[in-house]
Image (tube, rainbow, N blue to C red):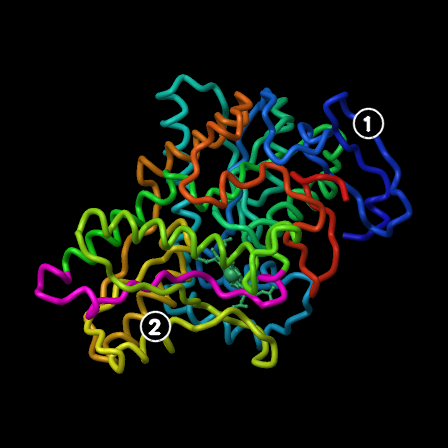
């Protein structure tokens, strides 16, 4: 995408669509939220959305898809195919098929059923960032049907470049590449890390895991709960969320996971009557060793546990919404193997998937935007939430890749 292609784009505002010129700041072109003209963190005015845009990561569905998919994921970074082939082995081992697209097909169907059950007349268009069906197709399909005011649900619950901003940048990229930027607007539901619909599965999973080990006669301190999420470069972590919040070394990304982990453990302590120690750990690191990423790595953490008198580990995929490759490979293959080698009993708890509580929570997040629900009445289980509907300027920017315009935020 060339900067010149972005010279003039429509920026919808509460007053109606208008076209603005770049204000002499390179490629800084806003794709501002239609409801954000006055810059609120929480949009408390109702917005008459036409449709939901379900935005997925995308994954290969056969061996021949694997390298083209990885080229898409790493687009713009010029990584040679030989290097991509090294990354491909997880996918190769599963027949070249990631389950992620099938999960999203099921999630789309589940959302449609829940919307119908509640009498909400909103179509759901599904498109991916990195594989077919692409976001381009979904947005074009929506526009062709006259659905131009879209609210996106990204299949990712937290704030960071990879888990929020990259989706928003891809919305902006697609609005430009399809030429639909003057007709279509894309807002996004808030990062939902602490929404009860998302947290539910983890509370139940950790409770079952802990109860199982207690039932086998283990003492609480012989059990360790490891909440696992995707590691990201430290530079991304520090820039996650609005810089004004000052949430510490790991930024909003780490703070959000820690807050949800603490909440889950409080619920489990209430139900089990004992407190089990827990930690936040990271998985799926990539990038050169010279680049600092969030630590500790889950496998290193597991290796340390026997020395601390731990006999059983509950592995919780807190950073993920479904059992895709990062869960099947990095947790179910590698981390469970590390636990076995360390002589630990281990269970991996479920991801939300299409759990009815999760699906209904996602619909609640859309409804709060449709109705303009006051922030004070929005559901959030941690003191950090409810998170912003409209991302602040610079929120989750990637300093490595440089500035790109993003939809669903405030103009810079
Ligand atoms: C935070 C985060 C999430 C969670 C949020 C969300 O769910 O969106 C996530 C999800 C996923 N990541 C996925 C796959 C990949 N991620 C990669 C690379 C990277 N991910 C990163 C972060 C995240 N990733 C980062 C910082 C990089 C390095 C790139 C850079 O330096 O900027 C690469 C390239 C190869 C490599 O580098 O390993 C692949 C193939 C799949 C699909 C799985 C499937 O197919 O089932 C999913 C759901
Ligand atoms: Fe990733």
Q: In which quarter of the image is the C terminus?
A: top right
Q: Do the residues labelled 1 and 2 touch (CB within 8 Å)?
A: no
Residue 334: mark: 2
**In the displayed structure, does residue 157 sit left or right of residue 40?**
left
**In the displayed structure, does residue 288 sit left or right of residue 88?**
right
Q: In which quarter of the image is residue 195?
A: top left
Relative to 186, residue 286 above or below: below
Residue depicted at x 60% and y 48%: 167
Q: Residue 229, position in %: x, y?
A: 43, 61
First to last magenta residue range:
213-238
Q: Residue 192, position in %: x, y?
A: 47, 42
Q: Can residue 65 be seen in this view?
A: no
Relative to 227, residue 134 above or below: above
Residue 388: mark: none
Residue 18: mark: 1
Residue depicted at x 37% and y 38%: 197
Q: Is residue 46 visible?
A: yes
The tag earlier along the polypeptide, 1 or 2, is 1
Q: Cα distance, mark 1 to mark 2?
A: 52 Å
Q: Element under label 2?
A: helix
Relative to 300, residue 319 above or below: above
Neighbour class for label 1 at 10 Å: few (<14), some, many (≥20)?
few
Q: Quadrant of residue 248?
A: bottom right
Q: Element under label 1?
A: strand
Residue depicted at x 44% and y 19%: 120
Residue depicted at x 50% and y 59%: 254
Q: Does the magenta stretch include residue 128?
A: no
Mark 2 and ligand 1: say if the CB distance to the nearest ligand atom is below 8 Å: no
Q: Residue 203, position in %: x, y?
A: 29, 48
Q: Is residue 215 magenta?
A: yes
Relative to 115, residue 387 above or below: below
Name the residue nearer the viewer: 81 or 368: 368
């Amino acid at each position: 995408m060339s900067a010149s292609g972005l010279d003039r784009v429509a920026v919808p505002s509460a007053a109606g669509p208008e076209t603005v010129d770049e204000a002499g700041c390179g490629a800084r072109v806003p794709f501002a939220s239609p409801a954000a003209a006055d810059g609120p963190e929480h949009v408390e005015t109702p917005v008459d959305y036409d449709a939901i845009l379900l935005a997925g990561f995308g994954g290969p569905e056969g061996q021949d898809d694997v390298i083209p998919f990885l080229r898409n994921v790493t687009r713009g970074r010029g990584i040679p195919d030989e290097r991509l082939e090294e990354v491909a082995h997880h996918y190769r081992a599963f027949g070249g098929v990631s389950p992620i697209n099938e999960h999203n097909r099921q999630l789309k169907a589940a959302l449609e059923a829940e919307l119908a059950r509640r009498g909400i007349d909103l179509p759901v268009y599904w498109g991916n960032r990195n594989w077919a069906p692409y976001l381009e197709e979904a947005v074009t399909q929506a526009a062709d049907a006259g659905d131009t005011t879209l609210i996106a649900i990204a299949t990712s619950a937290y704030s960071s470049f990879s888990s929020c901003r990259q989706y928003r940048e891809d919305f902006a990229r697609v609005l430009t590449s399809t030429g639909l930027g003057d007709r279509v607007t894309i807002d996004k539901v808030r990062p939902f890390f602490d929404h009860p619909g998302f947290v539910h599965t983890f509370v139940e999973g950790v409770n079952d895991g802990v109860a199982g080990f207690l039932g086998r006669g283990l003492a609480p301190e012989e059990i360790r709960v490891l909440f696992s999420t995707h590691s990201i470069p430290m530079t991304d972590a520090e820039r996650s969320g609005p810089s004004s919040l000052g949430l510490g070394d790991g930024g909003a990304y780490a703070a959000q996971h820690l807050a949800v982990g603490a909440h889950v453990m409080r619920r489990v302590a209430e139900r089990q009557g004992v407190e089990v120690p827990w930690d936040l750990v990271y998985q799926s690191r990539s990038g050169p060793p010279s680049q600092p990423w969030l630590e500790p790595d889950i496998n290193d953490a597991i290796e340390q546990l026997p020395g601390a008198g731990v006999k059983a580990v509950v592995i919780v995929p807190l950073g993920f919404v479904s059992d895709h490759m990062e869960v099947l490979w990095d947790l179910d293959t590698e981390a469970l193997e590390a636990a076995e080698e360390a002589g630990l009993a281990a269970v991996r708890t479920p991801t939300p998937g299409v759990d009815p509580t999760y699906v209904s929570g996602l619909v609640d997040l859309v409804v709060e935007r449709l109705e303009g629900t006051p922030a004070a009445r929005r559901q959030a289980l941690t003191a950090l939430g409810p998170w912003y509907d409209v991302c602040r300027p610079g929120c989750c920017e990637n300093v490595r890749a440089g500035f790109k315009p993003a939809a669903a935020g405030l103009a810079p």
